[in-house]
Image (tube, helix red, strand yellow):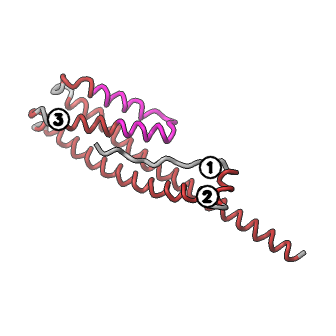
């Protein structure tokens, strides 16, 4: 009787530890994703200033400017799924990269002091976003690994925990 109670207590203890470990990892991923979103919001808040600073110079690049504005308007909506946030960020990185390349063809933009300040701020924010992405990816990797390991994977299935997507940006 005593050994049965000990075995049951040990099983309950193990299940509790697995549950707590999974919940902790999931919450950690969600917390860090919130930090990534905060950095992305900083970038999105800077974009209207960027667009207004260059729009008068870049009439031929109207489509590109509209693309950046459109992506921003989609990205600042609330209640986006993680995968939508990641997809929109990839599009924004690509659009901003194209915009920065286009800047090189406009010498008057290079002389605009306000734009230079905005570019410096944008570069700083991009570095912060990259650091936040790396931290997020580390947490996601640990979480995804945890829900793949036996016997924790059974607990993850019971809790309906699914793998998370890494926040990778294609190098262009």
Q: Earlier in the sequence, mark 2 or mark 1?
A: 2
Q: Which sits in the foreground, 42 or 59? A: 59
Residue 106 image label: none
Give x and y (percent) for residue 71: 37, 31
The residue under label 1 is 161
Tell me what residue is drawn at x 84 percent, y 72 percent: 5
Cα separation, mark 1 vs mark 3, equals: 45 Å
Asked if residue 114 lies left or right of residue 79, the reply is left
Give x and y (percent) for residue 149: 60, 60
The residue under label 3 is 103
- Answer with the quarter of the image where residue 59 lies: top left
Tell me what residue is drawn at x 14 percent, y 39 percent: 113
Q: Secondary structure at mark 2?
A: helix
Tell me what residue is drawn at x 35 percent, y 49 percent: 129
Q: Secondary structure at mark 1?
A: loop
Give x and y (percent) for residue 106: 12, 32
Question: Measured along the vertical axis of the image, is residue 151 above or below residue 87?
Answer: below
Tags 2 and 1 in contact by the CB under 8 Å rule? Answer: yes
Asked if residue 22 lies left or right of residue 136, the reply is right
Boundaries of the magenta span:
65-91
Q: Secondary structure at mark 3?
A: helix
Cα separation, mark 2 vs mark 3, equals: 47 Å
Question: Is residue 81 located in the magenta-colored stretch of the structure?
Answer: yes
Picture quarter with the C terminus: top left
Q: Earlier in the sequence, mark 1 or mark 3?
A: 3
Predominant SS along the magenta part: helix
Q: Which sits in the foreground, 149 or 59? A: 149
Q: Earlier in the sequence, mark 2 or mark 3?
A: 2
Give x and y (percent) for residue 122: 27, 44
Residue that protrudes farthest toward the right in the picture: 1
């Amino acid at each position: 009787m005593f050994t049965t109670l000990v075995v049951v207590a040990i099983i309950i203890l193990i299940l509790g530890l697995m549950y707590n470990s999974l919940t902790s990892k999931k919450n950690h991923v969600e917390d860090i994703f919130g930090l990534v979103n905060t950095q992305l919001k900083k970038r999105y808040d800077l974009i209207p200033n960027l667009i207004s600073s260059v729009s008068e110079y870049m009439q031929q690049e109207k489509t590109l400017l509209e693309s950046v504005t459109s992506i921003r308007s989609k990205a600042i909506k609330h209640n986006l799924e993680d995968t939508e946030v990641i997809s929109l960020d990839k599009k924004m990185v690509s659009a901003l990269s194209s915009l920065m390349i286009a800047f090189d063809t406009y010498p008057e933009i290079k002389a605009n002091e306000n734009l230079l300040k905005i570019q410096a701020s944008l570069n700083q924010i991009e570095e912060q976003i990259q650091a936040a992405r790396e931290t997020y990816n580390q947490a996601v990797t640990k979480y995804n690994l945890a829900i793949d390991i036996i016997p924790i994977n059974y607990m993850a299935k019971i809790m309906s925990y699914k793998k998370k997507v890494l926040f990778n940006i294609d190098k262009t």
